[in-house]
Image (tube, rainbow, N blue to C red):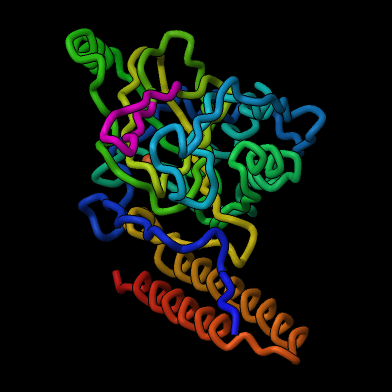
């Protein structure tokens, strides 16, 4: 009987482990966001998401392939990362900020970790309908998927629009600026891999007076490639689960607020090596685990449905080895899922 490849692409290489911040449980920021930032954001009148007004879709100047950085065959597609590309208009950014700094979102959804002092995440579609409409709009998903070279969907609604906010107080900014003069490659996040296959990082701040903020990727031969960071309204994507990378510090400017949305393949039969290592310490366990297990169960349901149809279609020639390989892969997938459900 013929052996068939069940999952695509072929599962030859396993994703390496992911680093996590030192804290095991999530905690709230000790450093509060300044009033001027919040008041400015709340001054924007509320409107609903309208793709004709809020999207400005353009291609990146350049896309780096996995092949170009010496990682051919790894990951879920051949796209490693992109240069910044236009995604949202200035009006859309104002609406994002209006929702992010609203009273309800700040009361419920602020987090800090050993890696970052101020994050806003896990607010969900009820508290931020504009942000959710934007990230689930078919034009946005199609554009990101085109650049990624594979059809993508947001991993969990918990991780739609994760925000890293850093605000400069004048004294601190000066001392960081001075350090940057002597060490232009000071890093904000040390070498790591992400928990999810693809990230899309969108800039919500004016970067006119900012320097730094690039991402450095490690190539297959141990070298490095530096990718430009996004400017206001633009985004970059990167296959961060499979590429070791670090973020260089950005200096100058009043604030740096970036939004990270994480993606996984839409196709249930695609390789899925999402983990929660770096997500767990900055997430509320009940919501995270119920969303995570729901998506894994749906993926399994879809995989078994597809395989059932294949078996029924080929009643005359049962693919014994193919079915056994499929079941073996699902056992590993269930084991990997259980491995993520640790108590914390
Ligand atoms: Fe990362």
Taking depth in this image into account, of 20 and 332 the one nearest to the observer is 332
Q: Residue furthest front?
A: 1
97 lies above or below 129: above
Residue 167: name its quadrant.
Answer: top left
Taking depth in this image into account, of 242 and 38 the one nearest to the observer is 242
Q: Residue at x 50, y 24 (%)?
A: 230
Q: Which residues are magenta?
A: 215-228
Q: How many marks?
A: 0
Residue 14: name its quadrant.
Answer: bottom left
Q: State the image coordinates of residue 28 (x, y, percent, origin top left).
A: 33, 49
Q: Is residue 138 left or right of residue 3?
A: right
In the picture, the quarter occupied by the N terminus is bottom right
Quadrant location, ligand no. 1? top left
Q: Residue at x 62, y 28 (%)?
A: 93
Q: Is residue 230 left or right of residue 33?
A: right
Q: State the image coordinates of residue 69 (x, y, percent, origin top left).
A: 40, 34
Residue 130 visible, this orientation:
no
Q: Is residue 221 magenta?
A: yes
Residue 266 visible, this orientation:
yes
Q: Residue furthest right?
A: 52
Q: Residue at x 70, y 86 (%)?
A: 311
Q: Is residue 222 magenta?
A: yes
Q: State the image coordinates of residue 91 (x, y, percent, origin top left).
A: 69, 24
Q: Is residue 142 left or right of residue 19?
A: right
Taking depth in this image into account, of 183 and 330 the one nearest to the observer is 330
Q: State the image coordinates of residue 304 (x, y, percent, origin top left).
A: 63, 81
Q: Residue at x 35, y 17 (%)?
A: 212
In the picture, the quarter occupied by the C terminus is bottom left
């Amino acid at each position: 009987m013929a052996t068939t490849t069940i999952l695509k692409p072929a599962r030859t290489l396993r994703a390496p482990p992911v680093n996590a911040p030192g804290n095991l449980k999530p905690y709230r920021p000790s450093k509060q966001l300044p009033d001027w930032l919040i008041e400015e954001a709340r001054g924007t009148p509320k409107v609903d998401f309208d793709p004709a007004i809020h999207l400005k879709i353009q291609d990146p100047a350049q896309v780096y392939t996995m092949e170009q950085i010496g990682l051919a065959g790894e990951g879920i597609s051949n796209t490693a990362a992109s240069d910044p590309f236009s995604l949202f208009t200035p009006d859309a950014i104002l609406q994002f900020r209006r929702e992010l700094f609203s009273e309800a979102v700040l009361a419920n959804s602020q987090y800090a970790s050993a890696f970052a002092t101020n994050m806003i995440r896990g607010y969900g579609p009820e508290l931020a309908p504009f942000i959710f409409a934007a990230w689930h709009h078919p034009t946005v998903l199609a554009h990101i998927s085109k650049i990624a070279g594979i059809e993508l969907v947001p991993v969990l609604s918990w991780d739609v629009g994760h925000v890293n906010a850093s605000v400069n107080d004048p004294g601190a900014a000066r001392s960081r600026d001075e350090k940057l003069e002597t060490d232009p490659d000071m890093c904000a996040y040390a070498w790591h891999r992400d928990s999810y296959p693809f990230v899309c990082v969108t800039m919500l701040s004016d970067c006119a007076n900012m320097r730094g903020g690039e991402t450095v990727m490690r190539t297959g031969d141990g070298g490095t490639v530096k990718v430009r960071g996004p400017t206001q309204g633009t985004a970059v994507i990167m296959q961060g689960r499979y590429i070791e990378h670090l973020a260089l510090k950005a200096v100058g400017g009043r604030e740096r607020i970036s939004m990270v949305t994480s993606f996984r393949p839409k196709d249930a039969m695609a390789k899925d090596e999402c983990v929660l290592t770096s997500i767990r310490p900055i997430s509320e366990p009940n919501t995270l685990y119920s969303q995570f297990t729901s998506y894994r169960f749906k993926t399994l349901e879809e995989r078994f449905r597809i395989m059932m149809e294949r078996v029924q279609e080929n009643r005359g020639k049962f693919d014994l080895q193919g079915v056994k390989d499929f079941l073996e892969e699902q056992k590993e997938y269930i084991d990997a899922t259980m491995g993520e459900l640790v108590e914390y």
